[in-house]
Amino acid sequence: MKVLVAHASRYGATQAIAERIADKLTEAGHEAQARPVEAVADLAGYQAFVIGSAVYFGKWLKEGTDFVRRNRASLAAGQPVWLFSSGPLGTQTTGANGRGVRAGAEPAEIAEFRESIHPGHHRVFLGALDPGKLGFRDRLIKALPAGRTLLPEGDFRAWAEIDTWANEIAHELAQAPIGRRAGEPTE
Ligand SMILES: Cc1cc2nc3c(=O)[nH]c(=O)nc-3n(C[C@H](O)[C@H](O)[C@H](O)COP(=O)(O)O)c2cc1C
């Protein structure tokens, strides 16, 4: 199946996750392409979609949100769609509010996207932060006391978990008749 893995990434961490997912789908026999959202003019020709964005200040990057909103009609048309976010940093699993770090990191737009395009799943993956790559504004924020606490540097991406998710998608795609959402009954 021809699968688009579209990504919105500021410093490359999310792009690498998207490329890894596309590689795993390709290994499983699908024709998967990872593309920055800005480079995707048209969804025609793809039979399934995986869309991911980095999270900044609790939200998807604007280009990722704009991509979903702009293509809402096509994405809601019945072909399978999965979403992922790359965000939380560090090794703590519970935040200061007692909620799971990942549950608490679900970006604001996901509720809207669940309503508008009915994705199969949304998954939050741990992210990566390399202070040497940060732009001026993000470097200032990282240098604040709260930034030092909440934005630890390092690469926390859990590749085995990302591979497992990609393999689950490959499996669901192999089961799904074209034009029908994965998991939907055939009758
Ligand atoms: C200034 C700044 C703000 C961030 N805000 C959040 C946030 O609100 N929630 C979150 O989960 N991660 C946040 N992060 C972490 C990033 O989402 C993470 O580093 C991500 O993997 C970066 O992906 P990218 O390299 O593709 O842009 C923030 C990082 C920076 C530098």
Image: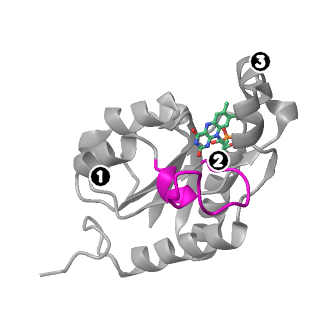
Q: In this rendering, which labeled residue sits more in front, label 3 or label 2?
A: 3
SS under mark 3: helix
Residue 44 appears left or right of 20: left
- The amino acid at mark 3 is Phe
Please, what is the dominant secondary structure of the magenta stretch? loop
Give the residues drawn in magenta, as a range. Answer: 87-106
Residue 7 appears at what percent x and percent y? 56, 44
How many angstroms separate mark 3 from mark 2 (CA)? 20 Å
Quarter of the rendered structure image containing ligand 1: top right
Which element type, helix, strand or loop, lies under badge 1?
helix
| Residue designated by label 1 | 114
Q: Which mark is residue 89?
A: none
Q: Amino acid type of disc 1?
A: Arg
Based on the picture, tell me whether residue 140 belongs to the magenta stretch. no
Residue at disc 2, secondary structure: helix
Disc 3 or 2, which lies upstream in sequence?
Answer: 2
10 shown above or below 172: above
* Label whose residue precedes the other's in the sequence (3 or 1): 1
> Label 2: which residue?
14
Q: Residue at x 58, y 44 (%)?
A: 35
Residue type of the residue flagged with mark 2:
Thr
Residue sitting farthest toward the right: 132
For ligand 1, tell me if the residue under mark 2 lies within 8 Å.
yes
Asked where in the image residue 65 lies, by quadrant, the reply is top left
Magenta span has 100?
A: yes
- Residue receiving disc 3: 136
Task: Estimate the x, y position of residue 51 in percent, counting from the top left.
Answer: 48, 50
Q: Is residue 29 visible?
A: no
